[in-house]
Image (cartoon, rainbow, N blue to C red):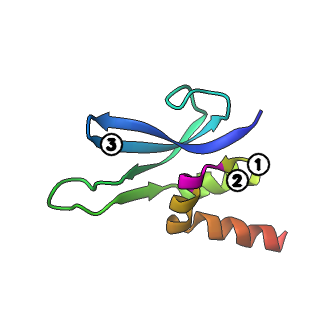
Amino acid sequence: MAVKLRLVRMGKKKQPTYRVVAAESRRARSGAFLEIVGTYQPRGISTAEPEMVLKIDNDKVLHWLQHGAQPTERVAKLLKVSGALEAFEASKVTQ
């Protein structure tokens, strides 16, 4: 079973919100997933706060990466922002 960390689109039309999930690679984009590991709002919460909002559970992400999950290109960039990718690289060096 090949597991990927990828985005699942949620939200209203023209107001996207994404979940960062661990899912089997053969499942549909918005299909079944194994676990939610975070959320990502590229447009912010409201017009008063237009900056992106990123909430990642680094412990869950680290667990999935250590068990062979591959992040997609966009999720890898988000994990780099959250610091989870650096923690994973550091854990690989110490092993």
How crowded pointer 2 is (Cα within 10 Å; few <14, some 14-19, many 20+) is rated as many
- Residue 65's disc number: 2
**In-front residue for pair 54/12:** 12
Q: Residue at x 50, y 67 (%)?
A: 81
The magenta span reads 71-75
Q: Residue at x 35, y 54 (%)?
A: 42
Vertical position of residue 81 compared to residue 23: above or below:
below
Quadrant where the N terminus lies?
Answer: top right
> In the figure, residue 58 lies in which quadrant?
bottom right
Tell me whether circle 3 and circle 2 mark residues in contact (CB < 8 Å).
no
Tell me whether circle 1 and circle 2 mark residues in contact (CB < 8 Å).
yes
Q: Position of residue 92 (x, y in %)?
A: 79, 67
Under tag 2, what secondary structure? helix
Q: Is residue 16 magenta?
A: no
Real-space CA distance between mark 1 and mark 2, rounded to the nearest whole angstrom: 5 Å
Circle 3 sits on which residue? 16
Q: Amino acid at mark 3?
A: Pro
How crowded pointer 1 is (Cα within 10 Å; few <14, some 14-19, many 20+) is rated as few
Circle 1 sits on which residue? 68
Under tag 3, what secondary structure? strand
Real-space CA distance between mark 3 and mark 2, rounded to the nearest whole angstrom: 26 Å
Q: Is residue 15 left or right of residue 82?
A: left
Which circle, 3 or 1, is nearer the viewer?
3
Q: Position of residue 59 (x, y in %)?
A: 60, 57
